[in-house]
Image (cartoon, helix red, strand yellow):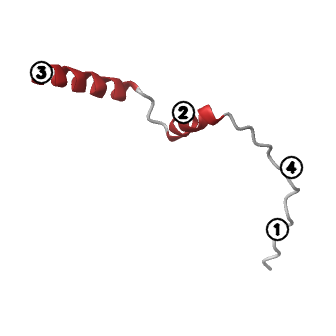
């Protein structure tokens, strides 16, 4: 039984090292099952830069 547990743990460790470790991919995987589509607000024109003189 102990050897079976060791085999299972080794396989889990091997699988987890194959996963992409990029943050964006992890976030997408976590929330993709929610299937929420958000509308992005329209962009406004950039403001005038300050006069530093």
Quadrant housing residue 33: top right
| Numbered tag placed on residue 1 in the rendering | 3
Q: In this view, does 6 lie to the left or right of 16?
A: left
Q: Kindly state the secondary structure of the residue where label 2 is placed.
A: helix
Q: Position of residue 18 (x, y in %)?
A: 38, 24
Q: Kindly state the secondary structure of the residue where label 1 is placed.
A: loop
Quadrant housing residue 10: top left
Depicted 24 relative to depicted 41: above or below:
above
Q: Where is residue 38 in the image (x, y as percent from the top left)?
A: 76, 42
Closer to the camera: disc 2 or disc 4? 2
Q: Which of marks 4 and 3 is nearer the N terminus?
A: 3
Q: In which quarter of the image is the C terminus?
A: bottom right
Q: Earlier in the sequence, mark 2 or mark 3?
A: 3
Which residue has dot 1 on it?
49
Q: Do the residues labelled 2 and 4 touch (CB within 8 Å)?
A: no
Instruction: Report the Cα–Cα distance between label 2 and label 3.
Output: 33 Å
Depicted 43 relative to depicted 29: above or below:
below
| Numbered tag placed on residue 42 in the rendering | 4
Most distant residue in the left direction = 2
Q: Earlier in the sequence, mark 4 or mark 1?
A: 4
Q: Are marks 1 and 3 in contact (CB under 8 Å)?
A: no
Q: Which of marks 1 and 2 is nearer the N terminus?
A: 2
Closer to the camera: disc 1 or disc 2? 2
Q: Earlier in the sequence, mark 1 or mark 3?
A: 3
Q: In this view, does 1 lie to the left or right of 50?
A: left
Q: Position of residue 6 (x, y in %)?
A: 16, 24
Q: In this view, does 50 lie to the left or right of 31?
A: right
């Amino acid at each position: 039984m102990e050897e079976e547990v060791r085999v299972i743990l080794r396989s889990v460790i091997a699988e987890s090292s194959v996963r992409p470790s990029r943050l964006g991919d992890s976030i997408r995987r976590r929330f993709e099952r929610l299937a929420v589509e958000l509308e992005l607000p329209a962009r406004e024109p950039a403001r005038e830069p300050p006069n530093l003189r």
